[in-house]
Image (cartoon, rainbow, N blue to C red):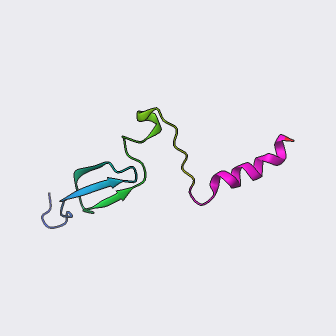
């Protein structure tokens, strides 16, 4: 393996929007995320609607014309 070409890994804290946090080794350090394994619908069984940039409204408006 070549020396000096790999990024440095450092201990960082990952904090979710739900408040859950944990530590990982990463090249980024501290991170903020929207969904983690505690609040993800697949693992928690709870429905969480995530709308980024109005995609849901755009989808409904596009296909509302076809449903009539």
The quadrant of the image that shows the C terminus is top right
The total number of labels drawn is 0
Main SS of the magenta segment? helix
Q: Is residue 16 left or right of residue 23?
A: right
Rendering coords of residue 24 (x, y %): 22, 51
| Residue at (27% x, 61% y) in the render | 30
Left or right of residue 38: residue 10: left
Q: Going 70% across and 50% down the picture, which residue do you hit?
A: 59
> Looking at the image, which residue sits at the far front?
19
Instruction: Estimate the x, y position of residue 6 in percent, counting from the top left.
Output: 19, 63
Residue 42 found in image quarter? top left
Give coordinates of residue 43: x percent, y percent.
41, 34
Q: Does the magenta stretch include residue 57?
A: yes
Q: Which residue lies furthest to the top in this view?
A: 45
First to last magenta residue range: 52-67
Residue lying at 55% horizontally and 46% vertically, measured from the top left: 49
């Amino acid at each position: 393996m070549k020396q000096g070409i790999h990024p440095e890994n450092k201990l960082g804290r990952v904090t979710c929007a739900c408040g859950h946090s944990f530590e990982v080794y990463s090249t980024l350090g501290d991170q903020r995320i929207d969904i983690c394994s505690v609040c993800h619908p697949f693992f928690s069984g709870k429905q969480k609607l995530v709308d980024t940039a109005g995609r849901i409204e755009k989808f409904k408006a596009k296909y509302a014309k076809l449903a009539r």
